[in-house]
Every structure is written in structure tokens, then in C-alpha cells.
Image (spheres, helix red, strand yellow):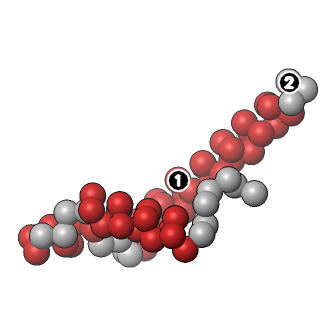
Amino acid sequence: MSGVDLSPDAVTARLRMASDLADLRPGHRLDAKIDLRPAAVTARLRIASELQELCRELQRAGRGKGR
């Protein structure tokens, strides 16, 4: 388990905090939109894949140290 509290109250609190931090003034709303052009999606998938591989390498390195 990840250790993240997924209770309704905890999730609501995190959503409220994110909402409080967000700048949703009319002139800035589009800044929060996700770019769905194929090149942008591909770039995000590539980053996610690289991060996943890094996590796997760190996990293997941790096992090699007897953890």
C-alpha cells in the first residue's frame, strides 16, 4: 500500500487545497488545460515511461543493498 490516505475526508481536503492553489481567473483558465496534440501526449508518455524505468532501477538498487 502506498501510505496515502484515501478516505473521503482526506481526498476532499487534498482537492480543496489544490483548488485553493489554482489560479482560475478567467484569463488563466486555459493555462490549466492539458495539451492533447499528438506530440504533447507522446512527450508526456515518454516522460512517464522514463520515470517508471527510473523507479524500477532504484528499486533494483535498493534490493542489491540488502534492503
8 lies left or right of 23: right
Residue 8 figure quarter: bottom right
Element carrying mark 2: loop
Using the rendered view, name the quadrant where residue 28 is placed: bottom left
Judge by depth and name the residue closer to the eye, 15 or 45.
15
Image-quadrant location for residue 58: top right
Q: Residue at x 12, y 70 (%)?
A: 25
Q: Nearer the viewer, mark 1 or mark 2?
A: 2
Q: Is residue 39 visible?
A: no
Residue that label 2 marks: 65
Which amino acid type is shown beneath numbered disc 2? Lys
Give the mark, 1 or 2, whose residue is nearer the N terminus. 1
Q: Which residue is mark 1?
A: 47
* Nearer the observer, 22 or 55: 22
Residue at the spot 36% in from the left edge and 67% down from the top edge: 16
In terms of depth relative to the viewer, which is nearer, 19 or 41? Answer: 19
The percent position of residue 4, horizontal first and vertical second, equals 62, 57
Q: Would you place residue 8 above or below residue 53 in this image?
A: below
